[in-house]
Amino acid sequence: MNKEPQLLRIKEAAEILGVSRSTLYAMFESGRLTRVYLQPGGPRVRLSEVLALSREEGGSTLAEQESS
């Protein structure tokens, strides 16, 4: 079993949360989300953090939307 965290691209995380990329970057600056830097490849976001934030905000995740 792979214990490495699943990482999302910035665009993917923004789509799941239903926000713009600039809003996602503001979430990084405020500390609501953490960036993970990969070389090469640019910043990523942990899927677990995105899903937790989505639930805190009362939003549904893409998986929840697809199942309904």
Image (cartoon, rainbow, N blue to C red):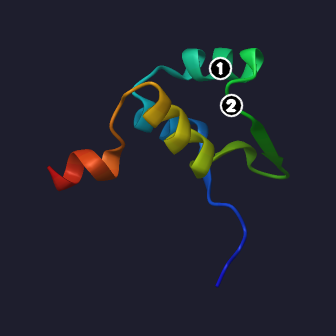
Q: Residue at x 69, y 44 (%)?
A: 44
- Asked if the residue under mark 1 is in contact with the one under mark 2, i.e. CB atoms within 8 Å, the reply is yes
Q: Crowding at label 1, few (<14), some or many (≥20) Cα neighbours within 10 Å? A: some
Asked if residue 58 shows in the view, the reply is yes
Return the residue nearer the eye: 11 or 56. 56
Q: Is residue 34 above or below residue 23?
A: below
Q: Quadrant of residue 43?
A: top right
The answer to whether residue 14 shows anywhere in this view is no
Check the image and name the residue furthest to the bottom: 1
Whether 26 is drawn above or below 12: the answer is above
Q: CA distance from mark 2 to mark 1?
A: 6 Å
Q: Circle 1 — which element?
A: helix
Give residue 27's mark.
1
Q: Residue at x 85, y 52 (%)?
A: 39
Residue 62 x/y as whole percent: 33, 46
Disc 2: which residue: 33
Q: Residue at x 76, y 37 (%)?
A: 35
Using the image, determine if residue 10 lies above or below residue 3.
above
Which amino acid type corresponds to the residue marked 1 in the rendered image?
A: Met
At 81% from the left and 52% from the top, the residue drawn is 40
Q: Is residue 33 above or below residue 26?
A: below
Q: Quadrant of the N terminus?
A: bottom right
In the image: residue 14, left or right of residue 4: left
**Residue 18 % position (x, y):** 39, 27
Q: Pick out the residue farthest to the right.
A: 39
